[in-house]
Image (cartoon, helix red, strand yellow):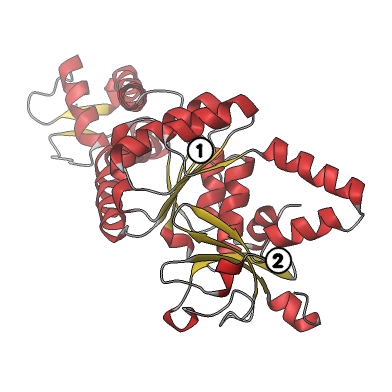
Amino acid sequence: MSKSKGRIAQSRFQPLRRAVKISAWGDLSIRLGLAFGLIFLVVMIHWWDREGLVDAVDGHVSFLDVVYFTMISVTTTGFGDITPVSDSARLIEAVIVTPIRFAVFFIFVGTAYNFIIKRSWEKWRMARIQEQLSDHIVVLGFGISGSEAVDELIERGTDPHRIVVIDPSEERLAIAEKMGCNVMAADATRDDTLKAVRITEAQNVLVSAGRDDTSILIVLTVRAMAPDMPISVVVRADDNESLARQAGANNVINPVRFTGLLLAGSAKGEHIADYLADLASVTGRVQLVEREIDQEECGGSITNLKSGGRGLRVYRGDQVLGFWEKACQDLQPGDIVVEIVPTENGTSNGDDH
């Protein structure tokens, strides 16, 4: 069982939401048709038992009188000009008409809730969420890679309320929603979708659409709207990696290639693959961290970092410097360092770096 599934199993049960396969107007037509069908049934019952009704105006109960009496009966208006007087008529009102009255009432109330109250509430709630979206992480695609990424972000301390997940699948979004994320069932390739989640105000964008062509199209759309946004994308075909970079992705992850690296590493030593997996996850004993150096670390060596971590690499502009290079012994303002630091699991079991 994955970490995300384990967390969901421990949470309070919530029913899954399923995408509606009929249009809103189709749903409305069905509801109204059912309501008027029940009213027509009551009209026919009253017409069949019209001998049990008395019209206080002219003493004659016509079909129009039956329709009129049905409407005031179903709506509980009850003016008293037409009344049931026979035992059978009163039994019909109590046993048949009253349940139908409640059914029609709930149909209209449910329709009003779904098409007016609920939608107004959802629009207001979405507007409130949008107002608070800033410096958030947008995850476009919640398949295997996307869900694992969100789970790892939460494990690393990211507030789920700062994560926005977009996916067309309601079943997947139900899982993300239970994890505490903001969710939207939409097409991530559309400009309107990205505007709705304030893509230009985001901190990072993670793309994992499940198909390389769709993922690259999403990267192009995001890059056009947010030229400086850090974008990470998952692609599975080697020849699509360069296309993803040309589309504007800052980081291109190929899970197939990474799996191959782990397999090759295991052939050179039984513990290499285990250590690489440990580095990639916050639940291991050690963790890879990328950060900009502090002011106090300027002029110092990569081997003597303030965090106590083991420095591995320095990114200085377009330069990539290894810890063994002389330039890493004199850190400069703006340097980005990649280091290994122990996690809580590591420090509790001893130093592992």
- Local packing at callout 2 (Cα closer than 10 Å; few below 14, some 14-19, many 20+) is some
How far apart are labels 1 and 2 at the CA level? Answer: 29 Å
Name the mark on residue 170: 1
Indicate the position of residue 259 as horizontal and vertical percent values. 76, 41
Q: Amino acid at mark 2?
A: Thr
Q: Amino acid at mark 1?
A: Glu
Q: Residue furthest left?
A: 57
User: Residue at image x 67%, y 66%?
Assistant: 324
Q: Is residue 322 at least partly visible in the picture?
A: yes
Q: Quadrant of residue 118?
A: top left
Residue nearest the viewer, comparing 207 with 269 = 269
Residue nearest the viewer, comparing 210 with 264 = 264
The reply, left or right, for residue 255 in relation to residue 62 is right
Indicate the position of residue 235 as horizontal and vertical percent values. 59, 33
Label 1: element kind = helix
The reply, left or right, for residue 320 in relation to residue 192 is right
Label 2: element kind = loop
Q: Quadrant of residue 97?
A: top left
- Disc 1 vs disc 2: Cβ atoms closer than 8 Å? no
User: Residue at image x 32%, y 57%?
Assistant: 133
Q: Between disc 1 and disc 2, whose residue precedes?
A: 1
Residue indicated by mark 2: 283
- Local packing at callout 1 (Cα closer than 10 Å; few below 14, some 14-19, many 20+) is some
Q: Nearer the viewer, mark 1 or mark 2?
A: 2
Q: Is residue 211 at least partly visible in the picture?
A: no
Indicate the position of residue 169 as horizontal and vertical percent values. 52, 35
The reply, left or right, for residue 342 in relation to residue 190 is right
Indicate the position of residue 17 as horizontal and vertical percent values. 51, 41
User: Residue at image x 58%, y 74%?
Assistant: 329
User: The C terminus lies in which quarter of the figure?
Assistant: bottom right
- Residue 163's place in the image compared with 226, above or below, is below
Name the mark on residue 160: none
